[in-house]
DNA sequence: AACACCGCCAACCGCCAGCAT
DNA sequence: GATGCTGGCGGTTGGCGGTGT
């Protein structure tokens, strides 16, 4: 049984069936029997190879050329056999079960395609790799989470068990600590303090208290429950080449965080602030004025790239190294090098910016494969070295000129950071929100509905107008109240975003509404909502 | 109809580990 | 221990076909 593509190829090659026909890209290696052929295999070559393996078995691939006269190098023979001629190969599209299995395996293994293939009988590493690089990346470009929540939950649970069993003493990590451990403390997000200044509730008609009512612990726990793989997810979100697309989760991650964190996740009474966002990230830092100054001045450490007019100036290694394994080198193929939108890079850089000694050292961890467990490991490392992160990260990456930038200037730059060339809103909240709403049943390949969100309104507005009209901010404000009392503020949220987000928001908020009112049920929805909110 | 764009996928390339000499 | 060979693995490339404009 041959795959469709193979049939195509054979059909094509059947016209010219000689294995020695020179092809356009042939040449290169020279074997003992003449120039080794490259390019697509012909059915004759396949027959020769099959015959050889039937007689001699697998292995000793370099002998194929000598024994059979096949003008292919051993590597090519092995690859052809392994990927196409093996009798136990299962051809055809991946089944749903296989797809799920691939995702599960990728959570555990990263880009270990061969190992994954070993877990999927009849499937080759190349198949799995191609599958991942296409369909899964498509999800990324669409801004959809790579890993379904349930799989991530499972992975996190597994990791929790693993960590508790293997790495930590019994009293070291308790549940809460574990949860914290899975919350990534991203110093650069401390910069949300600046957002707080820019988008202070005092500027708005929204009671500040309503912005302070989201229990971070709830967000945290539920964010974990919802199981978006924190850093894994983040790190796998890349700017899209598709300018129509949501470009990246970074829009959703960063812009929203600013909108939400500045108000909704603070604990002024705590003496410290724990910023929690949907992916489980958090930033812990002193809330005293001194540190605030430093942190706020370091706001948008990622956007400094734009601020200093050098959006491409930094491509920190750690960002790439911390990526999900699947993207370890993808920056070169579809990532940052092509970035039609400055904001993409800026947002990207925002994530990448904490190029601290700690993170660098973390990235050098042998476990830093981008897998969830590696992420957990890094998290633990960061937790253990929290202070050093706080001290080194923001300021060290902050250009001096940015430090002296006025808040107005920063605010204007915010549009660059969050927005796209078309919209001052960028894709921030809308895309992310819709991304999560899409998780509940819509096609995974369906681009977020909010992509077409009309977003010209605020362009000519005042600062306040701009701020107030920011969907992420509205969403943040509304949903912070929404979280507290879904039945009360749903209308506000819906009114504010219905025109932008269409039915998705309505559906999502309705879920929140109903689930909240049913006391305890629909917790997943809650977490989704809060995820969306905090990312929005 | 022509063109451009994009996704899919087979194949190649470079690196590395294991093994034999 | 050093060297070379072989096979395995992961990343990348390039061709092809489908689709949209």
Image (cartoon, coloured by chain):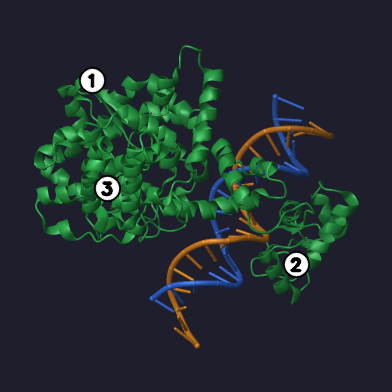
Chain colours: A green, B orange, C blue
Label at residue A310: 3
Q: Residue at x 19, y 39 (%)?
A: A195
Where is residue A358 drawn, in percent x and y? 38, 26
Tell me the residue that label 2 is attached to: A42
Which chain is home to disc 2?
A
Residue at image mark 1: A270
In the image shown, does A511 or A427 lie closer to the viewer? Answer: A511
Residue A313 visible: no
Q: Secondary structure at mark 2?
A: loop
Answer with mark 2 or mark 1, whichever residue precedes in sequence: 2
The one of A345 and A196 positioned closer to us in this rendering = A196
Which of the 4 image quarters holds residue A517? top left
- Tag 2–tag 3 contact (CB < 8 Å): no
Secondary structure under tag 3 reads: loop
Nearest-to-viewer mark from 2 and 1: 1
Distance, label 2 to label 1, CA atoms, is 70 Å
**Residue A163 seen in render:** yes
Counting from the top left corner in percent of width and height, residue A17 is at 77, 73
Quarter that holds the C terminus of chain A? top left
Quarter holding the N terminus of chain A is bottom right
Residue A346 horizontal side relative to residue A168, left or right: left
Direction from residue A76 to residue A327 in the image, left or right: left
Chain containing mark 1: A
């Amino acid at each position: 049984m041959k795959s469709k593509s193979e049939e195509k190829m054979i059909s094509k090659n059947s016209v010219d069936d000689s294995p020695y026909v020179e092809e356009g890209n042939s040449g290169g290696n020279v074997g003992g029997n003449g120039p080794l052929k490259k390019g697509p295999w012909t059915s004759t070559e396949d027959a020769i190879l099959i015959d050889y393996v039937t007689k001699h078995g697998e292995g000793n691939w370099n002998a194929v050329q000598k024994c059979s006269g096949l003008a292919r190098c051993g590597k090519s023979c092995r690859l052809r056999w392994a990927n196409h001629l093996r009798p136990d190969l299962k051809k055809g599209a991946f089944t749903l079960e296989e797809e799920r299995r691939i995702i599960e395996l990728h959570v555990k293994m990263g880009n270990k395609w061969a190992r994954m293939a070993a877990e999927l009988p009849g499937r080759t590493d190349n198949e799995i790799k191609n599958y991942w690089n296409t369909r899964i990346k498509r999800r990324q470009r669409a801004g959809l989470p790579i890993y379904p929540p349930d799989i991530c939950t499972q992975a996190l649970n597994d990791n929790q068990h693993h960590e508790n069993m293997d790495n930590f003493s019994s009293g070291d990590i308790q549940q809460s600590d574990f949860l914290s451990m899975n919350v990534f403390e991203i110093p650069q997000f401390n910069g949300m303090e600046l957002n707080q200044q820019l988008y202070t509730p005092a500027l708005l008609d929204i009671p500040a208290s309503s912005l302070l009512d989201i229990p971070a612990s709830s967000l945290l726990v539920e964010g974990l429950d919802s199981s978006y793989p924190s850093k894994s997810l983040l790190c796998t979100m890349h700017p899209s080449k598709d300018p129509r697309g949501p470009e990246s989760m970074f829009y959703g991650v960063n812009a929203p965080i600013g909108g939400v964190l500045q108000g909704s996740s603070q604990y002024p009474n705590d003496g410290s602030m724990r910023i929690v966002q949907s992916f489980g990230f958090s930033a812990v830092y002193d809330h005293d004025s001194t540190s605030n100054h430093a942190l706020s001045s370091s706001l948008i450490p990622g956007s400094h790239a734009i601020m200093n007019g050098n959006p491409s100036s930094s491509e920190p290694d750690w960002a790439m190294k911390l990526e999900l394994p699947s993207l370890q080198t993808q920056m070169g193929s579809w990532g940052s090098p092509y970035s039609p939108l400055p904001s993409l890079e800026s947002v990207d850089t925002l994530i990448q910016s904490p190029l601290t000694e700690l993170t660098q050292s973390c990235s050098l961890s042998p476990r830093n494969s981008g897998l969830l467990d590696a992420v957990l490991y890094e998290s633990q490392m960061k937790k253990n070295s929290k202070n050093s992160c706080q001290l080194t990260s923001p300021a060290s990456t902050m250009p001096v000129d940015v430090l002296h930038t006025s808040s107005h200037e920063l605010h204007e730059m915010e549009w660059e950071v969050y927005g796209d060339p078309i919209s001052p809103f960028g894709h921030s909240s809308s895309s992310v929100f819709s991304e999560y709403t899409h998780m509940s049943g819509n096609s995974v390949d369906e681009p977020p509905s909010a992509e077409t969100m009309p977003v010209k309104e605020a362009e000519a507005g005042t600062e306040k107008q701009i701020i107030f009209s920011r969907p992420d901010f509205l969403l943040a404000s509304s949903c912070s109240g929404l979280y507290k009392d879904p039945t009360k503020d749903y209308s506000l949220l819906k009114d504010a975003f219905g025109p932008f987000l269409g039915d998705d928001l309505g559906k999502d908020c309705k879920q929140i509404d109903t689930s909240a009112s049913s006391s305890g049920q629909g917790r997943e929805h809650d977490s989704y909502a809060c995820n969306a909110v905090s990312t929005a």
